[in-house]
């Protein structure tokens, strides 16, 4: 058994949090441009090891798409019906790809209003028109929507679609597709086989390397992750929907406050048998919990790709003060990292919640994390769900814990907490400052991490795990912040 992380943070004596420790500076024998911040979760590679939390005031389709385009991952929340979850995962998976094989189609005799409804709801700009035998007979894009209201309400697709379809054969290269798109000045290129059958669709925006760091699967679709209750759904209708949802999801994140429970383990095992996607399990907070899940959980080894850690340390969490139990993220990370080293180093570790400053990120990696997750950093951005409000001249957005009274009354996340417990909220709802585009937030997190890695002398996340940390004294903590300035205290 290694004492590696254990010797770094003496967590058996102190339950340490981010502010308790500092990374010791290391020797830097490389250029900033050589730093590689990429990290893996199972077989998925992320150029930016940052995730947005599965919370209903943080991650819906807009945030998930932006996070993945910029190299991270947004985990879609589950505080809504399966129907809404299906809508979200579909939008994320369809947002980008080199080849779309699940092409939205319509028949020529269908109404213009239906085509318009589909484009609005699937967030796409065009639909391929096919006859009953799936043979392509036209394409209908937003540009083909007629001007007159009467034509929209009563017109048929066949009277407004573009009949002369420029297409490409199956198996054509990216370069060939780019060439045809350029020559025809089109945005969409249906893939049609020799028999005239629709085989897929290539769009111009997906071919352009507009987002070189994007988190993508092998077909160029964005990686899609969704939170999931550990309870196996009882009704066949719900099971059917979940199966449909799975078609668009790469990774399910089991989403409970405390996963170290027989009932959640049993339910998750059933879900893993039922679904083919990969799974991250969480949250847990101790070495013993990780050891148990890895060695006695009997989870499908190929699908169990990660553990998410941290309990009660989130900015909106009240679990620790309501119940007296908690595992601050840094402590939980160091504990679980040790168990992963001891029992299965293929499992990735996600440090979740409690991050206040960019400098907390490098600390989490030093304690053994592969990726980090935050709600707090992203809740106030344009891409989070909800409206921008103004309080005393300041722009704000609402950020609420999934255990807050407000979130729990929705009925979908009651099983995130102790079964049957309804009267004791474990989270709060409050305002956070509106911070604009989340790209700006990510940029400052990225820079904090980059500079932290440079100061620590670590070129990669794995090297970061070897950096030394020390516990800071109370006076040291005071000194680490701006101090002895007239306007501060
Ligand atoms: P931050 O610090 O980013 O933390 O706001 C986000 C993480 O907190 C967890 N979470 C909760 N924990 N009560 C809790 O005890 C809650 O109401 C609650 N809501 C979210 C979750 O793990 C999230 O990623």
Image: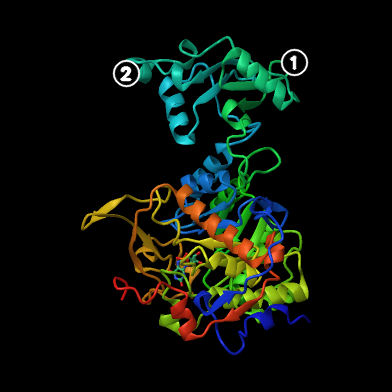
Q: Is mark 1 on a helix, strand or loop?
A: loop
Q: Where's the N terminus, which quadrant?
A: bottom right
Queried on whether the Cβ of the residue with tag 1 lies below 8 angstroms from ligand 1, the answer reads no
Q: Identify whether 416 is placed above or below 437.
A: below
The residue wearing badge 1 is: 194
Residue 488 or residue 135, whichever sits in front: 488
Q: Residue at x 62, y 85 (%)?
A: 10
Residue 157 percent coordinates (x, y): 47, 16
Residue 296 percent coordinates (x, y): 73, 76
Q: Identify whether 460 is placed above or below 321.
A: above
Q: Is mark 2 on a helix, strand or loop?
A: helix
Residue 200 percent coordinates (x, y): 66, 27
Q: Distance between the residues labelled 2 and 1?
A: 38 Å
Q: Where's the C terminus, which quadrant?
A: bottom left
Q: Residue at x 34, y 58 (%)?
A: 433
Q: Residue at x 60, y 13 (%)?
A: 184
Residue 118 or residue 183, whichever sits in front: 183
The residue wearing badge 2 is: 149
């Amino acid at each position: 058994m290694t004492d590696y992380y254990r010797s770094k943070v003496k967590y058996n004596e102190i339950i340490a949090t981010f502010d308790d420790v500092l990374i010791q500076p290391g020797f830097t024998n490389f250029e900033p441009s050589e730093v590689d911040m990429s990290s893996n979760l199972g077989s998925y590679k992320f150029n930016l090891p940052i995730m947005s939390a599965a919370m209903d005031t943080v991650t819906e389709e807009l945030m998930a798409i932006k996070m993945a385009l910029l190299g991270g991952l947004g985990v879609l929340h589950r505080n809504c019906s399966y129907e809404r979850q299906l809508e979200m995962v579909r939008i994320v998976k369809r947002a980008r790809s080199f080849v779309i094989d699940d092409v939205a189609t319509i028949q020529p005799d269908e109404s213009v209003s239906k085509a318009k409804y589909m484009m609005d709801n699937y967030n796409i700009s065009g639909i391929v028109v096919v006859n009953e035998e799936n043979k392509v007979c036209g394409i209908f894009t937003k540009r083909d929507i007629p001007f007159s209201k009467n034509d929209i309400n009563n017109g048929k697709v066949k009277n407004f679609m573009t009949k002369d379809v420029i297409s490409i054969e199956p198996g054509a290269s990216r370069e060939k597709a780019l060439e045809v798109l350029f020559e025809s000045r089109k945005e969409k290129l249906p893939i049609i086989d020799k028999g005239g059958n629709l085989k897929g669709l290539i769009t111009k925006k997906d071919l352009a390397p507009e987002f070189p760091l994007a988190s993508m699967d092998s077909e160029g679709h964005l990686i899609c992750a969704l939170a999931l209750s550990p309870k196996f759904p009882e009704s066949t209708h719900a099971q059917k929907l979940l199966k449909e949802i799975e078609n668009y999801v790469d990774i399910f994140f089991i989403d409970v406050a405390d996963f170290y429970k027989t009932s959640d383990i049993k339910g998750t095992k059933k879900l893993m048998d039922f679904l083919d996607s990969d799974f991250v399990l969480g949250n847990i907070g101790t070495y013993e919990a990780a050891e148990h899940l890895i060695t006695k959980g009997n989870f499908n080894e190929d699908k169990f790709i990660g553990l998410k850690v941290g309990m009660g340390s989130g900015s909106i969490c009240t679990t620790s003060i309501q119940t007296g139990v908690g595992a601050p993220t840094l402590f939980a990370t160091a504990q679980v990292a040790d168990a992963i080293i001891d029992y299965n180093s293929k499992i990735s570790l996600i440090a979740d919640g409690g991050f206040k400053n960019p400098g907390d990120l490098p600390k989490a990696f030093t304690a053994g994390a592969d990726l980090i997750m935050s709600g707090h950093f992203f809740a106030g951005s344009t891409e989070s769900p909800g409206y921008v409000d103004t309080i005393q001249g300041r722009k704000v957005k609402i950020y609420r814990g999934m255990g807050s009274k407000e979130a729990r009354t929705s009925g979908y996340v009651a099983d995130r907490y102790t079964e049957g417990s309804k009267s004791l909220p474990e989270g709060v709802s409050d305002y956070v400052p509106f911070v604009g585009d989340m790209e700006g937030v990510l940029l400052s997190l990225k820079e904090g991490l980059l500079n932290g890695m440079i100061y620590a002398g670590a070129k990669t996340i794995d090297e970061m795990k070897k950096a030394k940390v020390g516990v800071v004294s109370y006076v040291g903590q005071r000194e680490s912040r701006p101090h002895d300035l007239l306007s501060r205290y």
